[in-house]
Amino acid sequence: MQAKCIFKINLLTYKITIVGSSNNPNSAGYNFTASLLTYGFKGKIYPVTPRYSEILGLKSYPNVKEIPGSVDYVISAVSAPLVPAMMEDCSHKGVKLIHLFTARFSETGRPEAAKLEQEVLRLAKSYGIRLIGPNCMGLFSPRRGISFSDAMPEEKFGPIGLISQSGQAVEEIVRSSALMGLYYSKAISYGNALDFNECDFLDYLAQDQETKVILMYVEGLRDGRRFLNSLRAATAQKPVVILKGGRSQSGARAVASHTASLAGSTDLLEVVLAQAGAVSAESMEEFIDLAVTFHYLPSLRGRGVGVIGGAGGASVLAADQCESAGLEVVPIPPEMREELKNRGISIWDWIGNPVDHSIREDTNFNHGTIVEMMARNEKFHLLIIMFNEPHHERQKNMTADNYLEEYRFEDYKPKPVMAVVPDRSLGLDHYADWNWKIIYEIRSKLLAGGIPYYPSIGRAARAARKVADFYQRDSR
Amino acid sequence: MQAKCIFKINLLTYKITIVGSSNNPNSAGYNFTASLLTYGFKGKIYPVTPRYSEILGLKSYPNVKEIPGSVDYVISAVSAPLVPAMMEDCSHKGVKLIHLFTARFSETGRPEAAKLEQEVLRLAKSYGIRLIGPNCMGLFSPRRGISFSDAMPEEKFGPIGLISQSGQAVEEIVRSSALMGLYYSKAISYGNALDFNECDFLDYLAQDQETKVILMYVEGLRDGRRFLNSLRAATAQKPVVILKGGRSQSGARAVASHTASLAGSTDLLEVVLAQAGAVSAESMEEFIDLAVTFHYLPSLRGRGVGVIGGAGGASVLAADQCESAGLEVVPIPPEMREELKNRGISIWDWIGNPVDHSIREDTNFNHGTIVEMMARNEKFHLLIIMFNEPHHERQKNMTADNYLEEYRFEDYKPKPVMAVVPDRSLGLDHYADWNWKIIYEIRSKLLAGGIPYYPSIGRAARAARKVADFYQRDSR
C-alpha cells in the first residue's frame, strides 16, 4: 500500500524566487537569500523587492511579474497583508509552489488574521498554486544547496529525513544530530499546514530513496484518517519517529499560538501511532537518541542486553535503568560461566551482568574478554559499554586509545554496541580539563568506529528498547 | 523525635591507622595513606605493614600493637583472612572503630566468606569495636582533611551530607556535584553494613549542624523499622534525597554481589519513603539534580511555573515537559495581560506562558520585561529561563554577558529561578567551538549568581516538582 505522493521537492527547485528579499541583514528576506548563496544552491535565485535593484550581488526585481521566463518556486517573506497581491502576481508566472514564511495569520488568535489565512487558501486553489506554511522556515535540502539558515552543517548530506511544524526545531535537530555524525536528506518546516500538510510530506519521504529514517515533529494533525494511512505505508518502508508537541493543556495552548493547530487527544494519538508502527518520542532528547540509534544500529533485533564497564553502584543502577526501560539484563549464561572457569578466571562464579570491573584480580581477564564472549553469545542482542571520565592523578598520562584498547569493536560486528559516555554541564573552569579532553576524544573515536554514545545508561536503554521493538514488530 | 546518635566522626579522627599500608602506588593501602597526606589530614597517621619501615615519609609499624599510645580509628586494607588477627591486635590498643575497606566477604556469594564475615562481627562485639563496612571506601570529611581518593575537590567544604553503600557512587556524586558548585560536609561509604548501618549514619547527619541536605544511596536496608523512624526524624530537620539501587530483578542480583544486601520490595519501599517525607530519585542524574535544587532553591514552595526563553517548538515542548512533571504552567494572569497592553506592547494578546521569544516586534519588550512581571506576580512560584547555544554567524561577536544582560537576576529574588542550558555530547572537533565557549561562560556566570542550571527542561521541571512537594508538605 503506497499513498500517491503529490509533494516533491526535485521538480521545484531549479529556480527560487524570494519575494520580500532585502539588503538588511536582520531581515528574513535577506536571510533566505544569503542562505541559498552560502549553502551553494546551484539553480537561479531571483530576489524580489521594490526597494533595491541588487541584493547580495544578484539582480533584484520590483515584483514577480518582472522576472524573465517562468517562475516555479517562491519563498514569501512579505508581511501577511501583502500576500494576496503577491499570489496574484505569481498566478501570471506559472508558479506551482509558494513557501509562506510570512506569519501573523491564524496563530495570532485574531479573527481578521484567520480570515486572511482562509482567503490565501482560497486564492491558492483558484490559481492552482500549492502552499508550504504559512508561518514556517520551509525547505532544507543539502544535496540541492537549499537552506534557510546559516547554522546548518555545510555540504553534509545523509539518510535522515525530517518533517517539522517548527522551524526552530529543524535547526535544533539538524544541529545537534550533526554533532553525532547524523546528516539529513531533506528537512521540511511546514508551520500552519494550511495546504500541504504532514501527510503530503510523509508520503514524500516514505518514497524518497535518499531517506532511510523519518523524523516528525508534529503539533496537530490536519487530516487524522489520511495520516494513519500514510503512516502505515511509511512504517512499512522505514522507521518513523514522532515527537508530538502539545501533549499537555499548556502545551496545547502554546501550540494554538505557535502553529494554530489543534493538539487533540494525546492518549488516543499514542494508540494510533503505536498501531501504525511509528515510534513515539517523549522529549527532544529522546527524539535525537532514537534517530541516532536507528541510524547506527539497524541490526538491533531483541531486548537481551549485556552491560560492561560500570563498577559498584554504577553497575547496580545500570541494571535498574535497563530493566526499567524494558530491556532484559541477561544473567551470565551457564556456557559462559563454564568458559570463564575453564580459562582460570578466579572470580568466574562472581562475575555478573552488568559486569562490575572494580575487582580485577585476574591478569588474564579484562572487559574485552567478556565483551567478546557476550558478542559471540546469541542470548545478548545488544552490548552497552559504559565509560567514566578519568579522574585520578595516575590516569593523567593516559590517552583515549588506552581506554579503548581493551575492546575490539570490529570483532563484535554485527552485534549492536552502544556506549555510555558521561556528560556534565561544564563551566569555563573545567571544559578544557585533561580528563574531559580524553572524553571528547573517546567520543570522536567511537563515532568514527560507528559506535553511538549516550550521556546516560537510561537514555541508551530507553532508545534501545524502542528501536528493538520496532524491528521485532517487523520480524513477526 | 530525635534518634540517639551513636556514630560520630569527630570523636574518632585525631589519629588514623592504616593497616595494610604499602609503598605500591597501585595498592589500596598506599591510596588511603597518600589521600590523607595530600588532602591535608591534621592528625597523626600511622601506616601499618610488616613490609616497609617507612611509607610516604611516615614511620611505619609492623603491627597495630607497636604503635605508641592508644589507637582510635583504623582503616583496614589487609585481605579478608587477615582481619581477625588484626582485630585482636586492635583490641589491645583501645580501638573504637575500624573501617573495613577489606572486601571479598559475603558479597562473593561464597559460604566460607560469609562465615568469615559473621566471625568478624562476633569478634567486633566481643572486643567492643564498631565497624564501618566491610567492602567500602569509608569516610570523606573535607573539613578534617579525610579523603579516600585523590579525585575529590580540594579544600572544599559545603552543606551536603552523603551516605552511600557504594564508594564509586561517592566519588561520582562528589565529583559531579563540585562542577555545579556543590560541596560536602561529610560523605560515608559503608558497603556491606555489617555493624554500623544506614540508620546510624542517617541519625548522625540528621543531627549534624554542618549538613543542610542529606543524600543517600542505598542498596538494601539492614533494619527497616528503625530506618523508618530515623528517616522521619531526619526529614523533620532537613531534606533527605534517596536513590535506591536494586529496584529491578537484575539490579537486585547486582546488589547481592556488590554489597550482599537484600534489595527488597521496591514498591513497598517507595511508599515507606514517601510516608516518611523523603524524596526519592529515579536515577543518578536526578539524584544530583535534586541536590542542586535543594541547595540553590530552598525557597521553592509551589508548583506554578513561568517559562521564558524558548521559541516555537521549544516553547511547546517546554510546556509539555513541565506539565508532565506535575508543575502548573500558569496562563498569563489578567492583570499581567492588562499591564502588557498598557505598556503598548503590540503582541500583548498573543504572549503566553511559555513566553515564545521568536516574535519580538516591540522594541520596548524583551525577556527581562516579562520575567520581571512574573517575578512580581504571586501566581508564579518558580521561573525557568531557557538558553540556547548561539549558532548564527551574526552571534559570533556576542559574549555571555550579551545573553544575560536582558535579565536582572538580583531583582527577581526571592523568587526561585532555574536556568536550562543545553548539553551536547561534544567530541574533539567541537568542544572548543566559539558557541560552546559562550555556553561554558553562561554556566559559570549563572552559578556565580546563585542560579542553578539543568541540561533539559524536563530535568529542571522534575527536580522542581519534587523539591516543591517536599516544602509544601512542610507548610501543611
Image: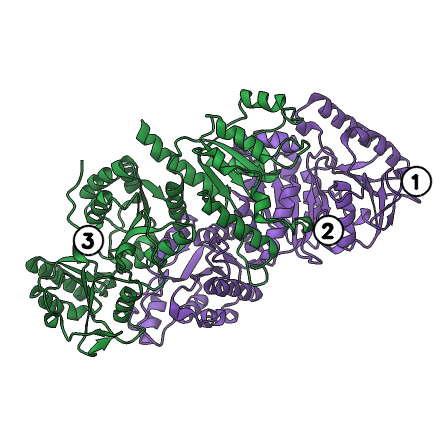
Chain colours: A green, B purple
**Percent of width and height locating residue B100:** 76, 37
The residue closer to the viewer here, B319 or A223, is A223
Identity of the residue drawn at 50% across and 51% down: B463
Above or below residue B225? Residue A179 is below
Is A4 on the left-hand or right-hand side of B121?
left
* Mark 2, residue position: B141
Q: Are marks 2 and 3 in contact (CB under 8 Å)?
A: no
**Chain at tag 1:** B
SS category of the residue bearing label 1? helix
Look at label 2 and name its amino acid: Ser
Which of the labelled discs sits on residue B36, or is there none?
Answer: none
Task: Give the mark toward the camera: 2 or 1.
Answer: 1
Q: Check disc 1 and report the residue beneath it.
A: B66
On the image, the x and y values in percent for residue B42 come to: 82, 55
Look at 18% across and 35% down and name the residue there.
Answer: A1
Neighbour class for label 1 at 10 Å: few (<14), some, many (≥20)?
few
Q: How many marks?
A: 3
Side of A427 relative to A228 (left or right): right
What chain letter is assigned to the residue under label 2? B
As shown in the figure, which amino acid type bears the numbered disc 3? Answer: Asn
Mark 2 and mark 1 lie on one chain; the one further toward the N terminus is: 1
As helix, strand or loop, the secondary structure at mark 3 comes to helix
| Mark 3 burial class by Cα count in 10 Å: few <14, some 14-19, many 20+ | few
* Mark number, residue A10: 3
Residue B169 image offset from top left, x and y in percent: 62, 43
Give the image quarter of residue B364. Answer: bottom left
Q: State if disc 1 and disc 2 touch (CB < 8 Å).
A: no
| Contact check, label 1 and label 3, Cβ < 8 Å | no
